[in-house]
Image (tube, grey):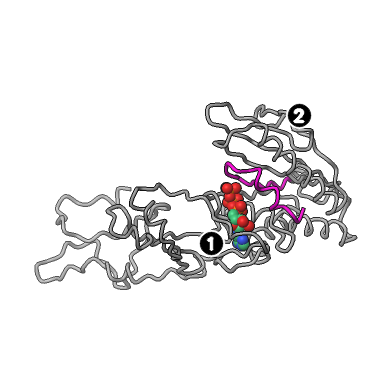
Amino acid sequence: MDELKSPPSRPPSRPPSTVTVRRNPPRRARPTPSQAPIPISLPPTPSQTIPSFPIDDILSIEIPENNIVKNIENENLKVFLRIRPRSISQPQGKKEGVAKNVWPQSKQIAKSKVKKVSEVCLKENDEHSVTLCPPQSMQDQKRSKTEVYEGFSYVFSADSSQDDVFDKMVNPIVEDFMKGKSGMLAALGPSGSGKTHTIFGTGRQPGMIPLALHKIFLGTNGNGAQSPRTLYLSMFEICSERGRTERMIDLFNDGVDICLQQSTIKGLHESVVCDVQQAEALIAEGMLKRATAMTNSNNQSSRSQCIINVRCETCGDFDASSNSALLTIVDLAGAEREKKTGNHKSL
Ligand SMILES: Nc1ncnc2c1ncn2[C@@H]1O[C@H](COP(=O)(O)OP(=O)(O)OP(=O)(O)O)[C@@H](O)[C@H]1O
């Protein structure tokens, strides 16, 4: 350490022997990229030129794009964005579904509702970022500004199919689950943004749950080399109603109340499932109980999270730490849950 101490006679303008590039995080010192050795021992005489700070060298360091992509692949928590199509084709005889507006409404905006303009406000920049532009009617308002959101693990465009979303987002989780690694998928977003559509889907466009179940059962039965596995299914709902305490309801056990004790759900019923059809039938039944629970609560200002767990138990080929893995899928739905029962035609 003594060697690094500056002698008292050293002029204050002397360049440092290392350059610290501050990033947040990580923070670490990098050696200066300059090839020319920086004199350390001799103080500069008036005839010597003091080497300039190598700011251009530092700024010209290119971080290979592969590194960025690699980091995204290795992230434990991934955030995907799916853009909902603007116009949604409905079965014959039905009007196009109008999603509830979640933005705060001033009188001026409310007026603009009279003349409906179909405008795209969310634009995809690339696979990892989007630009959100305020609609024209809001553009002269002070607080409206165009913003870029970046850093998504992947952005699914409005024309992406359920299969595209499954392949990129859910398939890796299911594959890990089949190897014994637990995983979770949670759908978040404003009301009407397509969470339930993505998670459950329709008869023609099955969602992440039916697609995951197919993959899991194909993996379980299709490969004779695997050791025997038992799959368990459970399903519950967390209801939050304004002015009331949160309730947890077991959707496989006649909607009885369950509770959380030290991060374990007490009393949750698990059913052994042997094939996709059985699993889908159980979930469809659970969805009906969810709808009934909602109607009984008779409170339109409530929210509900539906949680589906698939647990896989094996006799040996998972890693040594555990012989059980859990796949959790969460759909955080809005108030009008009873209207949703028609959505789950695939189940
Ligand atoms: N990618 C999509 N392709 C086709 N239809 C879609 C898509 N996303 C959403 N929809 C349709 O948009 C409507 C609203 O979607 P959905 O019910 O899934 O929203 P949500 O986010 O679950 O809403 P809430 O929070 O109120 O439960 C539905 O009619 C659904 O079928």
The quadrant in which residue 149 appears is: bottom left
- The answer to whether mark 2 and mark 1 are in CB contact below 8 A is no
Q: Residues within 10 Å of mark 1 (few under 14, many from 20)?
A: some
**Secondary structure under the numbered disc 2 in the rendered image:** loop
Task: Report the residue that reaches farthest toward the left.
Answer: 46
Q: Could you tell me which residue is drawn at 39 percent across and 48 percent down? A: 105
Residue 45 in view, yes or no:
yes
Q: Give the range drawn in magenta.
A: 326-347
Q: Could you tell me which residue is drawn at 45 percent across and 63 percent down? A: 122
Give 36 or 342, whichever is nearer the viewer. 342
Depicted 214 relative to depicted 100: above or below = below
Q: Could you tell me which residue is drawn at 82 percent across and 51 percent down? A: 317
Q: Is mark 1 within 8 Å of ligand 1?
A: no
Give 217 or 32, whichever is nearer the viewer. 217
Q: Mark 2 points at which residue?
A: 267
Q: Mark 1 points at which residue?
A: 83
Residue 217 on image: x %, y %: 83, 56
331 sits to left or right of 315: left
Q: Label 2 sits on what residue type?
A: Gly
Q: Residues within 10 Å of mark 2 (few under 14, many from 20)?
A: few
The quadrant in which residue 309 appears is: top right
* Label drawn at residue 143: none
Q: Could you tell me which residue is drawn at 60 percent across and 67 percent down? A: 160
Q: Does the residue labelled 2 lie within 8 Å of ligand 1?
A: no
Q: Label 1 sits on what residue type?
A: Ile
244 sits to left or right of 39: right
